[in-house]
């Protein structure tokens, strides 16, 4: 299995479900997945790394359409994988869904969605996480940012 | 005592559709006459990476995006479905984590055929009423299964709805709710079986019609209303014919139910059916509108709701999540071979 | 630091070697190298072996000891160490051997590289190669090694106007070279239409843009330069060894189209050898995918960033071009037994610098460069060798 034991998945749930990364309190650089320390501020960043939840909105930097996949992804081919630059800065590798292959392009605006990523056969655990889809397909009105108040 | 009701709502319908005539052609049947007979032209199909948990999360996130309540204020999540991804391990925990409501909350999964979602609404209503929680999240969602070649294959589809129940900024007051329950085996799926079985025409008269009729009359009697007092009515919709027929029998007009009648274009989303119907009504409802809803779950039972839209509906950011009509129209057709792959009909190990 | 020379090289045939086991392959390559070097065997101070994933491919770890044992050195108790850096495992093993002699600790070292990939099915090979990526943040979500390089290719095409045909031309050139190499997995030429009409693996890369799944092994005997003359007339001196790392995941890189690990490893190597890229007569670069060769010739400084495609189009890198690249056929045509590749590249350079490359011989070759990459560029190792 490409996904290891359940504990290995479970400990990444905040990142995979909710795009929790962190920000360096010293230089304000953002990271996903979260880093133990800021690679730029190093010692100065110790104790100043703060969790943040990314909006899930971003832009496609590059993509590919995978036809030859690992065992756990065989049933999904052909599928789109992309590197997305999140609006807050970090880049992330993820699948693009709800997008016809002929429409995918570099520069496309996308936002995150919640999907099954892998399952450990018919008897093992199901692993969920982020994928991305073309932005604003349906949400036409005011793009209110989610209330991350309080 | 302040009013309790729906604070926000969200729905989700997967993008894939298969036409009834495509399914019919595989089994040597006449698609056109089947479509006419069932009142279903096409149905939604979950993508290979979607299940009841992902649909529930999408619907719940939609509900949260429309309002400004903090997820940590949600004190309970109940997810009603007959297609929970795990037989043992709750769907609700996945939803709770994905919307940021964990860890201090109550969670359980419900199953009551197609009415598990409205049962979840009643539970949340009671918890809020008893002041045990501030907000409750009630979800009804399914990726329903039908055996290849079975009549259900034309209707069993995927989708869901999520409702936040509370007493602040209520957009739809729940004036009253009641249920009607008997032991009636019209449709079932035995433990550890993949596909359901049903009693054929027995699912009509003694099951769907009897329970909805009695439950609906009981509620109208309790709140002293008549069908014409309502702007909208929502009934469970296993096909396109039953809800139209039950509405007529109860004295509701077609105009009262048409906003909630999604089944011709998305099929029967089971636990999601009345939830999506209600979401569609809330998409356009105005202050003062009165809404009547009766769900039906095989086995069997019905839950009825009498609701009134408040002035606060204008404060809800309805455009922050997709409207039901938009999701119904955003679709991609697939053929039966793709359908077979996506729904795991070709299961082998 | 002492000077170090290659005094012996050995290579097995590359390909789908159904009748050859892991032990057989590494022993064959090692024996050939020892025979070629003129040493007896008892002089060996240490062994280093590069293998990316013997655990997944043949269910065997503890490869260092296994190789010493299979080669008949267990009773001599020679220290033997496995080195791993994904597809750069071979190159890293060469570096470890080199450093152990340069430091004065050892005089004679055997370096091997091996991968026996065909004992598992195709999907398992794809999955194993994907472990060279970031397992948690790339492969978990469905990325494959070919997919990640395809994303580099797509961005390269977007930014620099590199064409599908440019990519194809890398494969055509490398097959033309491989056709002249009796050790190559594919010893036949291919045409543009073969590449363009092949099945897509990961858009824009097709089957002919990808190196194959290969069984094979390669070995070197390294010796301090002062002692080298005792064993051979034609020692080839390692004049530089530069290594660098970068983020495991492609998405974390400064620039998607630049392998900074290559840029830095090459800079270090040129500095150590006290030369520039202009002094290189030929190069073996890590063309695991066609786009990788285009990026490599840019990042090694042979051409400007973005002009790799054009350079291929202008035939600069063919056997008769001004800078022959991958005269062996490269990973594409010679084959890519991942752990063996970095060592096999040195074998080719040594043969060229000794003037033993037969039909592939680059005239008057004096300085050659070998460029070996792990994953999508998280590890890079550059060696420069000189005929003396």
Image (cartoon, grey):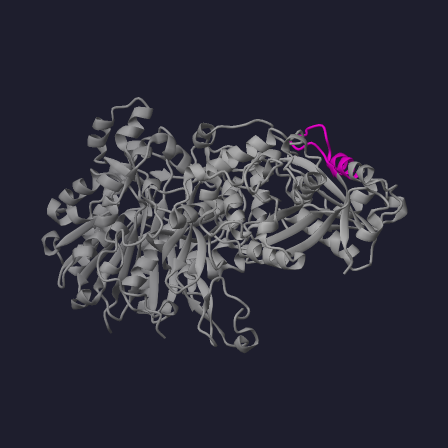
Q: Is residue C28 magenta?
A: yes
Q: How many marks?
A: 0
Q: Residue furthest front?
A: C364
- Residue B140: where, in percent of width, then height? 33, 52
Give percent across and percent down for residue B282.
20, 57
Task: Identify the residue at horizontal 19%, vertical 54% (top origin).
Answer: B281
Q: Which quadrant: the N terminus of chain B?
A: bottom left
Where in the figure is residue B337, as x and y percent of width and height?
38, 30
The location of residue A34, given as percent across then percent down, is 50, 65
In the picture provided, is C218 more to the left or to the right than A110?
A: right
Residue C17 in which image quadrant: top right
- For residue A150, above or below residue B65: below
Q: Which residues are magenta?
A: C10-30
- Left or right, residue B62 beside residue C124: left
Residue at 61 percent of width and 50 percent of height:
C279
- Is B128 rendered above or below residue B163? below
On screen, C88 above or below B70?
above
Q: Is residue C373 visible?
A: yes
Q: Nearer the viewer, residue A47 or B16?
A: A47
Considering depth in this image, is B286 or A130 the residue closer to the camera? Answer: A130
In the image, A37: left or right of B171? right
What residue occupies the far left of the structure in this picture?
A: B228
Q: Is residue B218 magenta?
A: no
Position of residue A49 relative to residue B218, above or below, is below
Between B68 and B132, which is closer to the camera in this rendering?
B68
Is residue B103 in sight in this rendering?
A: no
- The quadrant the C terminus of chain B occupies is top right
Q: Quadrant of residue C164?
A: top left
Left or right placement of residue C191 versus residue C337 in this view:
left
């Amino acid at each position: 299995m490409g996904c290891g034991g359940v504990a290995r998945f479970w400990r990444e749930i905040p990142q995979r479900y909710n795009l929790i990364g962190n920000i360096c309190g010293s230089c304000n650089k953002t990271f996903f997945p979260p880093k133990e320390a800021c690679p730029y501020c190093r010692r100065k960043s110790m104790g100043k790394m703060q969790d943040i939840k990314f909006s899930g909105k971003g832009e496609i930097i590059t993509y590919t359409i995978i036809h030859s996949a690992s065992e756990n992804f065989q049933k999904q081919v052909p599928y789109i994988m992309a590197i997305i630059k999140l609006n807050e800065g970090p880049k992330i590798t993820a699948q693009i869904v709800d997008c016809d292959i002929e429409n995918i392009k570099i520069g496309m605006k996308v936002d995150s969605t919640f999907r099954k990523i892998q399952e450990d056969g018919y008897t093992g655990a199901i692993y969920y996480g982020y994928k991305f889809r073309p932005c604003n397909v349906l949400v036409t009105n005011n793009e209110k940012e989610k209330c991350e108040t309080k | 005592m302040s009013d309790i009701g729906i604070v926000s709502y969200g729905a989700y319908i997967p993008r894939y559709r298969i036409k009834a005539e495509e399914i019919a052609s595989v089994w040597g049947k006449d698609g056109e006459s089947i479509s006419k007979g069932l009142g279903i032209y096409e149905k939604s199909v979950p993508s290979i990476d979607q299940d009841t948990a992902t649909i529930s999360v999408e619907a719940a996130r939609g509900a949260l995006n429309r309002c400004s309540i903090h997820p940590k204020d949600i004190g309970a999540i109940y997810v009603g479905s007959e297609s929970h991804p795990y037989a043992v391990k709750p769907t609700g925990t996945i939803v709770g984590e994905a919307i940021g409501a964990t860890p201090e909350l109550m969670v359980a999964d419900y199953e009551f055929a197609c009415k598990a979602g409205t049962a979840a609404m009643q539970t949340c209503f009671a918890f809020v009423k008893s002041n045990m929680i501030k907000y409750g999240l009630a979800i009804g969602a399914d990726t329903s299964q039908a055996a290849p070649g079975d009549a259900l294959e034309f209707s069993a589809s995927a989708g869901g709805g999520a409702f936040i129940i509370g007493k602040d900024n209520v957009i739809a007051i729940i004036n009253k709710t009641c249920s009607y329950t008997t032991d009636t085996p019209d449709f079932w799926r035995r433990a550890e079986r993949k596909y359901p079985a049903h009693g054929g025409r027995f699912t009509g008269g003694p099951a769907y019609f009897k329970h909805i009729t009695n439950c609906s009359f009981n509620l109208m009697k309790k709140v002293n209303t008549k069908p014409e007092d309502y702007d909208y009515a929502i009934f469970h919709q296993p096909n396109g014919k039953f809800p139209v027929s039950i509405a007529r029998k109860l004295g509701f007009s077609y105009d009262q139910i048409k906003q909630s009648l999604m089944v011709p274009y998305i099929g029967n989303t089971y636990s999601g059916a009345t939830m999506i119907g209600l979401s569609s009504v809330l998409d356009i409802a105005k202050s003062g509108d009165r809404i009547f809803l009766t769900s039906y779950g095989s086995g069997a039972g019905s839950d009825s709701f009498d609701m009134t839209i408040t002035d606060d509906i204008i404060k809800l950011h309805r455009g922050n999540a997709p409207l039901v009509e938009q999701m119904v129209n955003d679709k991609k057709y697939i053929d039966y071979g793709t359908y077979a792959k996506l729904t795991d009909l070709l299961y082998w190990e | 630091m002492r000077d170090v020379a290659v005094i012996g090289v050995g290579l097995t045939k590359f390909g789908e070697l159904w009748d050859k086991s892991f032990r057989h392959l590494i022993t064959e390559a090692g024996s050939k190298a020892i025979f070629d070097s003129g040493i007896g065997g008892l002089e060996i101070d240490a062994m280093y072996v590069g293998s990316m994933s013997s655990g997944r491919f043949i269910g065997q770890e503890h490869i260092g000891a296994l190789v010493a044992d299979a080669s008949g050195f267990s009773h001599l108790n020679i220290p033997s160490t496995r080195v791993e850096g994904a597809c750069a495992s071979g190159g890293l093993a060469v570096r470890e051997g080199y450093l152990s002699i340069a430091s004065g600790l050892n005089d004679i070292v055997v370096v091997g590289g091996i991968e026996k990939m065909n004992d598992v099915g195709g999907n398992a090979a794809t999955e194993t190669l994907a472990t060279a990526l970031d397992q948690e943040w790339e492969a978990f979500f469905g990325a494959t090694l070919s997919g990640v390089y395809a994303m580099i290719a797509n961005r390269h095409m977007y930014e620099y106007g590199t064409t599908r045909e440019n990519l194809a031309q890398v494969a055509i050139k490398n097959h033309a070279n491989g056709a002249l190499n009796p050790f190559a997995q594919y010893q036949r030429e291919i045409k543009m239409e073969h590449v363009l009409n092949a099945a897509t693996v990961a858009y824009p890369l097709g089957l002919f843009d990808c190196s194959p799944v290969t069984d094979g092994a390669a070995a070197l005997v390294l010796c301090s330069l002062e002692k080298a003359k005792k064993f051979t007339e034609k020692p080839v001196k390692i004049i530089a060894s530069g290594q660098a790392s970068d983020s495991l995941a492609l998405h974390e890189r400064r620039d998607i189209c630049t392998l900074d690990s290559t840029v830095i490893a090459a800079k270090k190597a040129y500095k150590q050898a006290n030369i520039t890229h202009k002094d290189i007569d030929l190069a073996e670069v890590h063309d695991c995918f066609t786009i990788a060769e285009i990026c490599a010739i840019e990042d090694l400084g042979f051409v400007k960033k973005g002009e790799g495609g054009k350079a291929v189009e202008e035939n600069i890198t063919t056997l008769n071009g001004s800078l022959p690249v991958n005269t062996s056929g490269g990973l594409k045509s010679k084959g890519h037994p991942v752990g063996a590749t970095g060592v096999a590249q040195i074998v080719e350079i040594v043969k060229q610098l000794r003037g033993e490359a037969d039909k592939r011989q680059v005239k008057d070759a004096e300085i050659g460069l070998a460029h070996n990459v792990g994953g999508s560029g998280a590890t890079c190792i550059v060696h420069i060798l000189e005929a003396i």
